[in-house]
Image (cartoon, helix red, strand yellow):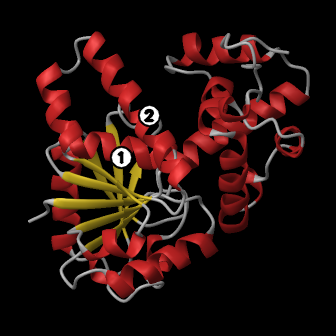
């Protein structure tokens, strides 16, 4: 039975996973080597609590219980040793994930399950960084985690049926809908999202229309909740570029990153987190193109 969850990484995805895990009644510890990053995560999680209370999504009592379920810790080995499930939520860089999984394997108890929050990378390859491939799986949460209803669960080559069932139950207890699929580069959602987002950048560099017009056409014409430029600014242009490079390597030319996307990333235009991506956020006004 899963009672204690360790989330390794306190960035946007890690803090979101911790929030829904705590709401689901799990004892959740967020682990990060940076005390500053942990304090930022704690502040951001509190903002989510307050917003959801004010909007009537949760009660004060539910929020208070969830707060009591949350811990923050810089000792990654300590967190790994006490968890029934470890969810890795570090950047999409193989070397970083390898380091984290090796640490997890060294300190986690034998019964502990390992999950990677990856949007494109191979759970089979990530499982090879440790020694329990049958207990390793991918849990692809979506940003923002507290709003997006889906967790895409991806089985690696040796992931057991029992592990898939346990992780599906965990995600559902967090209030999420789930799909369980077999591994293939990009899974379902990232392959489609990367194609749409990349094509939007090609349209922009060809002068087909402004970001606002392209986003509006996609939202109203195809019934998307967000336009591709709104989405990439939220996710991060650097994250999208890394995903496209990986998919281009694995699946071929149709995923070659648009030159304009690469140019924006080189210029430091990474989206909301940097204050400017496709749109400008430096004055706190959303969706204003500079």
Q: Horizontal and vertical percent for residue 226?
A: 55, 21
SS class of the residue under badge 2? helix
Determine the image quadrant of residue 111: bottom left
| Quadrant where the image shows the N terminus | bottom left
Mark sitting earlier along the chain (1/2): 1
Total of numbered circles in the picture?
Answer: 2
Which of pointers 1 and 2 indicates the residue nearer the eye?
2
User: Horizontally, is 238 left or right of 184 in the view?
Assistant: right
| Quadrant where the image shows the C terminus | top right
Q: Is residue 23 visible?
A: no
Decide: is 246 above or below 189.
below
Decide: is 150 above or below 228.
below
Tell me the residue at 88%/46% (across/down).
266
Q: Nearer the viewer, residue 125 or 49?
A: 49
User: Horizontally, is 64 left or right of 73 in the view?
Assistant: left
Tell me the residue at 82%/27% (across/down).
203
Q: Horizontal and vertical percent for residue 259?
A: 89, 44
User: Horizontally, is 63 left or right of 129 in the view?
Assistant: left
Q: Nearer the viewer, residue 70 or 84?
A: 70
Q: Which mark is residue 171?
A: none
Determine the image quadrant of residue 204: top right
Q: Which mark is residue 43?
A: 2
Tell me the residue at 81%/35% (across/down).
269
Q: Which mark is residue 17?
A: 1
Q: Is residue 2 visible?
A: yes
User: Horizontally, is 6 left or right of 42 in the view?
Assistant: left
SS class of the residue under badge 1? helix
Q: Determine crowd level at label 2: few under 14, some 14-19, many 20+ residues with C-alpha closer than 10 A.
A: few
Tell me the residue at 67%/14% (across/down).
284
Q: Nearer the viewer, residue 186 or 4?
A: 4
Decide: is 199 above or below 154.
above
Q: Horizontal and vertical percent for residue 129?
A: 48, 84
């Amino acid at each position: 039975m899963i009672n204690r969850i360790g989330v390794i990484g306190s960035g946007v995805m890690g803090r979101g996973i911790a929030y829904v895990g705590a709401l689901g009644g799990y004892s959740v510890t967020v682990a990060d080597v940076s005390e500053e990053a942990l304090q930022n995560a704690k502040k951001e999680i509190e903002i989510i609590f307050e917003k959801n209370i004010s909007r009537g999504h949760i009660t004060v009592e539910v929020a208070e219980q969830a707060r009591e379920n949350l811990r923050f810790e810089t000792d990654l080995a300590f967190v790994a040793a006490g968890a029934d499930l470890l969810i890795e939520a570090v950047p999409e860089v193989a070397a970083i994930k390898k380091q984290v999984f090796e640490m997890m394997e060294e300190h986690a108890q034998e019964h502990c399950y390992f999950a990677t929050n990856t949007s494109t990378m191979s759970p089979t390859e990530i499982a090879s960084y440790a020694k329990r491939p049958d207990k390793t799986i991918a849990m692809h949460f979506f940003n923002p985690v507290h709003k997006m209803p889906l967790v895409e669960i991806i089985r690696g080559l040796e992931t057991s049926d029992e592990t898939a069932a346990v992780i599906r139950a965990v995600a559902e207890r967090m209030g999420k809908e789930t799909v369980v699929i077999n591994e293939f580069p990009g899974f379902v959602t990232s392959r489609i999202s990367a194609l749409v987002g990349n094509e939007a950048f090609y349209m922009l560099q060809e002068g087909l229309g402004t970001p606002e017009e392209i986003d509006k056409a996609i939202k109203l014409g195809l019934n998307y909740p967000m336009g591709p430029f709104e989405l990439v600014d939220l996710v991060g242009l650097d994250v999208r570029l890394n995903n496209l490079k990986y998919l281009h390597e694995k699946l071929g030319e149709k995923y070659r990153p648009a030159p304009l996307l690469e140019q924006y990333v080189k210029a430091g235009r990474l989206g909301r987190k940097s204050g400017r991506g496709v749109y400008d956020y430096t004055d706190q006004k959303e969706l204003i193109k500079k």
